[in-house]
Image: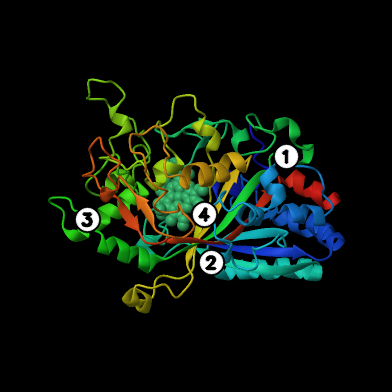
């Protein structure tokens, strides 16, 4: 069994709080920081069995500043996220000019993630940590995340329910729900069974996890206007319903969370709310054609090949045994920024920053976040092996450097073998999700944090 008293809370279950503060800091005085970490901060850290508040995690430059120079066996972690943008733009597709200055570089040493039901509690907690650590750290950036209000609770800023699908972890997730795939804990936790680099990890790193943080700005009024301006022309649907269908097909789920594959023409909130049904599907189609197996390669009637949730979790689209599960991540994201203002809605233009504070956990950054972003999300031919030669990038988070994107298959009327006809494509004029930066962190176990304090 996993030692859940030693694993920081966010990794396997998420903080599950309404408010979360990401407090990015640099270490100024390593000796004081380490002594306070051991004496005062460690007791505040919450583990998987507690689910309440504090979480602490370090970048590669942070570990080095604290005297922890062991090789953790993760190439991307060592470079830091900005290197993946700056040196090799093709990798994650970000345009460095959209990055906030605080993330551009390697000056962030760590992040405290403070979570609670109220912003007031978080402020109290932050003041406590600041008084403990004093001048041994300096704030570089902070980002306040919060669940959206009222009936939008749990929905991200475009309006879609989030947090519906997570992989199950062998020996931890119970019960495993229908449609949930169970994988070894080493997919997410360093040093556990299934860790792809098991032999390369120092002992203190066991039961830690790599945290990928991304500040992803969402242009909500622009996205809404795009849907309004391009309703899918489906007989029996009003233009407003056609716009709603376009959004649902871009994501692969309706705003309620119901998968379009199971409910292709209308939202189904009852299906969405049923955890025994809302993940119970693959994209394989019972083959009605004389040549078995072919229909799955061109039929986008129920769900576009490029839909966001299909790009990042292709549920049976790939050859059996192709290792789809090695790319699973655990997500623990939260929206940041206020609701769209009346002025922004009237002008169809964003003037206040809002988006998703994206967090994913994996034992290997390349297999997890990097692979999804580079090989699947930003590829115009993924899922591979389909008849459609230009599926397009992920319509929600895929990018071709910020410019227009052709996405085929969004229109359910496109059901012909000649899917190379680009006149059927929906063209997005720009990215509606823009990266403002991020960093790679390592989230040690409590034992690991003690080892860092003693280094
Ligand atoms: Fe996505 N969205 O609102 O459109 N995502 N995502 N994501 N995402 C998911 O199934 C969204 C982002 C994954 O198992 C849902 O829990 C937005 C990044 C994965 O079927 C919705 C942003 C990456 C899944 C969104 C964003 C991923 C997933 C459905 C950025 C990885 C599970 C809710 C602003 C690199 C798929 C659910 C599965 C689901 C949205 C970012 C990955 C609604 C707005 C950067 C693996």
Query: Alpha carbon of mark 3 to alpha carbon of mark 4: how far?
Result: 29 Å
Q: Quadrant of residue 203?
A: top right
User: Mark 2 against mark 1, which lies toward the viewer?
Assistant: 1
Q: Helix, strand, or loop for circle 4?
A: loop
Query: For the view shown, which residue lies furthest in the bottom direction?
Result: 343
**Residue 73, numbered circle:** 1
Labels 4 and 1: the sequence-earlier one: 1
User: Mark 2 against mark 4, which lies toward the viewer?
Assistant: 4
Question: Is the residue indicated by label 4 positioned so its CB lies within 8 Å of ligand 1?
Answer: yes
Q: Is mark 3 in CB contact (under 8 Å) with mark 1?
A: no
Q: Position of residue 225 (x, y in %)?
A: 31, 66
Side (left or right) of 151 relative to 166: left
Labels 3 and 1: the sequence-earlier one: 1
Q: Residue at x 46, y 54 (%)?
A: 399
User: Mark 4 against mark 1, which lies toward the viewer?
Assistant: 1
Query: Alpha carbon of mark 2 to alpha carbon of mark 4: how far?
Result: 17 Å
Labels 2 and 1: the sequence-earlier one: 1
Q: Position of residue 103 (x, y in %)?
A: 64, 63
User: Mark 2 against mark 3, which lies toward the viewer?
Assistant: 3
């Amino acid at each position: 069994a996993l030692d859940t008293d030693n694993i920081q809370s966010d990794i396997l279950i998420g903080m599950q709080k309404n408010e979360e503060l990401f407090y990015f800091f640099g270490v100024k005085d390593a000796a004081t920081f380490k002594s306070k970490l051991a004496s005062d901060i460690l007791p505040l850290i919450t583990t998987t069995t507690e689910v309440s508040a504090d979480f602490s995690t370090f970048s590669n430059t942070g570990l080095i500043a604290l005297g922890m120079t062991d090789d953790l066996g993760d190439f991307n972690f060592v470079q830091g996220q900005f290197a993946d943008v700056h040196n090799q733009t093709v990798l994650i597709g970000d345009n460095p000019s959209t990055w906030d200055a605080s993330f551009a570089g390697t000056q962030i040493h760590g992040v405290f993630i403070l979570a609670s039901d109220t912003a007031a509690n978080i402020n109290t907690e932050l003041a406590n940590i600041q008084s403990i650590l004093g001048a041994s750290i300096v704030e570089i950036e902070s980002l306040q995340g919060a669940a959206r209000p009222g009936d939008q609770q749990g929905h991200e800023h475009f309006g879609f329910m989030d947090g519906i699908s997570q992989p199950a972890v062998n020996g931890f997730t119970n019960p495993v729900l229908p449609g949930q795939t169970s994988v070894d804990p080493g997919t997410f936790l360093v040093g556990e069974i299934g860790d792809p680099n098991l032999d390369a990890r120092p002992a203190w790193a066991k039961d830690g996890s790599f945290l990928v943080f991304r500040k992803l700005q969402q242009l909500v009024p622009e996205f809404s206007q795009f849907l309004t301006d391009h309703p899918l022309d489906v007989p029996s649907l009003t233009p407003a319903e056609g716009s709603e269908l376009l959004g649902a097909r871009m994501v692969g789920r309706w705003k309620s969370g119901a998968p379009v594959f199971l409910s292709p023409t209308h939202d189904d909130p009852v299906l969405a709310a049923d955890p025994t049904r809302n993940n119970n599907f693959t994209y394989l189609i019972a083959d009605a054609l004389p040549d078995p197996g072919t229909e799955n390669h061109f039929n986008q009637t129920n769900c576009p090949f490029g839909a966001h949730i299909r790009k990042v979790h292709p549920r049976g689209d790939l050859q059996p045994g192709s290792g789809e599960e090695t790319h699973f991540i655990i997500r623990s994201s939260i929206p940041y920024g206020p609701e769209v203002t009346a002025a922004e809605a009237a002008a169809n233009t964003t003037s206040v920053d809002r988006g998703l504070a994206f967090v994913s956990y994996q034992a290997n950054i390349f297999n997890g976040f990097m692979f999804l972003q580079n090989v699947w999300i930003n590829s115009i031919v993924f899922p591979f092996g389909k008849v459609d030669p230009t599926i397009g990038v992920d319509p929600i988070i895929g990018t071709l450097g910020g410019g227009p994107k052709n996405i085929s298959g969004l229109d359910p009327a496109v059901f012909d073998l000649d899917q190379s006809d680009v006149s059927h494509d929906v063209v997005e004029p720009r990215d509606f999700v823009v990266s403002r930066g991020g960093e790679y962190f390592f989230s040690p176990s409590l034992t690991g944090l003690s080892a860092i304090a003693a280094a």
